[in-house]
Image (cartoon, rainbow, N blue to C red):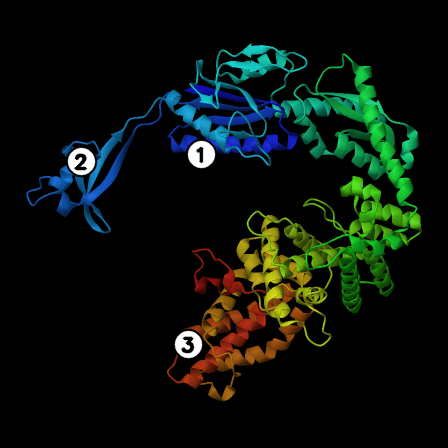
Amino acid sequence: MTDLLFEIGTEEIPASYITPALNQMQILFAGLAEKHRLEMHSIYCTGTPRRLTLFVKGLPQKQESVTEEIQGPSASIAFDKAGNPTKAGLGFAKSQNVDTNNLLIKKTPKGEYCFAIKRIEGRETLQILPDMLTEIVKSVSFPKSMKWKGNSLFFARPIRSFLALFGDKVIPLEINGIAAGRCIFGHPFLSGKKIEVSEANWDLYKRLLKQEKVVVDMTERREILRTKITQLMSPYGTTIDDEALLDEVTNLVEYPNAIECSFDEEFLDVPADVIETAMKEHQRYFPIKKRDGKLLNKFIAVLNRNESNASTIIQGNERVLKARLSDARFFWKEDRKIPLERRVEDLKNLAFLEKLGNYYDRTNRIVELSNFISHRLINCNKLAIKDAELAKRAALLCKADLLTQMVGEFPSLQGIMGREYAEWDGEEPSVATAIAEHYMPRYAADNIPASKIGAVVGLADKVDTISSCFALDLIPTGSQDPYSLRRHAFGIIRIIEEHAFTLELKEVFAKSLNLLPMFPENPLHSHPKILTELVPKIKEFLKDRLFNINIEKGYRYDLVNAILNAGVGFDDICDFSQRLKTVSDISREKWWFGLVTVVERTFNIGKKANSMGTVNEALFAEPEERKLWDLYKENEATIRKQIDDKKYKEASEKYCSVFAKPVHAFFDKVFVNVEDEKIRNNRLLLLKEINELYSQKVADLSQIIMPDDKSPKSLIPK
């Protein structure tokens, strides 16, 4: 077995491009190796800003030989009655370059056919690799690519060299006039040397590069940086708190190093979030904080070189940051001259979406929707009456900071600066907090708003965004989601769940859609399109998100479907989550399969019932149906009360204990599909009533996938 070492040497690639490109290279090579019948022991990709490297251990010298069967004409056409090849058979053998002795007859679903048996000899791996590696180079995609030396090759940055070794042999590869060889290059500033690699040896490759000031292994480079940064932070009692930034700077350097710098203390009167954003987003610096989290006037800069000229490097970084912080301090001073409330009117000059007006119109919708949601929550004791006015105030001001110079310079601070300016203006602390929180969660792992006021305004904001986009048919497709509607849906679900808000999705989205300018609000009737088309589409979108979110939480897919497809549905997300948790818990109980059987069997036959009409006791002809109906009447109110009180476990256990045996006895003794239509439909209605007592309000257990060894009789409790 022989190893492969392949390096694409480039001009400096953006840090965010590197990891996705390496992942693509690994997937592409694995797929091509399988296609070409090349087994391997392992595959590893790593890189730096100036090289993308693929190392494959244990490739064969030659691909595996195979025997292939190729179908030809039918046997009756390929051979005569004596079994000799006809002209058609001889022609087929010639076209496949095989002897007629290698033709045979095989049975197929369409009859007997002639097949040519061909042995395809494996090619030398060294002959296959050039095409494989060329395809990889041309297939790796980037957010933005460049072309040079003609139009035949696009890549993130111009390619300058290829290292391509199979064992100790150079792979005969040339792309866009660049021929592969056995040479690589050291660090551009600390070395600049051309290095010859004798063989495809991973340890040798790493060692040669390290001698020339390049740490090529990404994991090793990250840990070196982590150690250096931690050592610089430890005297202040703090550690790295931003792993994403560490990942990014790892892909900015080849020679990992770090140095401590400082800035004037006078800049600490600027909000800490501003200083951190200027450091991280603009310069990729690591802020240094005290043990209590308070920001110090110090930071750590990551270097791509040694400390031979440390004082100059420190001065350069400090000078750059000073310019940034000077701008920020100016913005902070100037922005506070105009209160947020006075900026609201100017939101008319900031466009939102075509046909949906401007941010002033959007703000008014968020205010109305926040008020609507607040009063729905007040009605169910989920929000204090005084909080409704605070939510309206926060909603009025929540977008005003978009017009500040600070947010113009640092867009990621929207909401956060709104909080800072609101506090300066003397707004209620809860209002200021809600302005910052209403954007949360900003990403998948982010927190949700901690305050109920922030949660209300956050819901209103996200609901308005989804309603607006669906009204304009800007619906996510595949991986495309330019307006982050999936993230907004995720936020809505998490906020409702974690704050235990009782809200009806249909009602909230209908209200939101009615506020849009293309649907002038009618206090008596919604626009027909809202209830018949848009709300169902939005609910289906949220249903998909609910399904995916709960699968990621570890719930079984059939349990999630059972709760989603219950008659009551998922309009109340908080109730949906409670039912899912309960049903998941009881799925581990001994009586679970008995419960599933009752609901499933009554559903399968009850669905045939005429939906009109009620059970008529006068039509009962068998004692088992009379007994089943009496049990239903005796226990219906109790079970419904338990369900209404959200005692889903107690209701499930009661339902199972009451109906499991009688339903089984009913199916054993009573023939449902009798000729008499009235009796037949009456029996179907009885079973439908029993089924819907549970499946309408708790879970449609007909969705449950039961193990093969669970027969209906074995599921009935003793």
- Which of the 4 quarters of the picture holds residue 292? top right
Residue at figure coordinates x 6%, y 43% from the top left: 82
Name which of mark 2 and mark 3 comes first in the sequence: 2
Visible residue check, residue 24: yes
Q: Secondary structure at mark 1?
A: helix
- Comparing 505 with 144, the one in front is 144
2 and 3 marks in contact (CB < 8 Å) = no
Horizontally, is 500 left or right of 579 in the view?
right
At which x and y percent is residue 277? 79, 36
Horizontally, is 161 left or right of 420 in the view?
left
- Comparing 17 with 567, the one in front is 17
The three-letter code of the residue at mark 3 reads Lys
Q: Which residue is mark 1?
A: 31
The three-letter code of the residue at mark 1 reads Gly
Q: Which residue is mark 2?
A: 93
Horizontally, is 717 left or right of 66 in the view?
right
Q: What crowding class fits label 1: few (fewer than 14 Cα within 10 Å), some (14-19), or many (20 or more)?
A: some
Residue at figure coordinates x 93%, y 31% from the top left: 266
Q: Which residue is mark 3?
A: 669
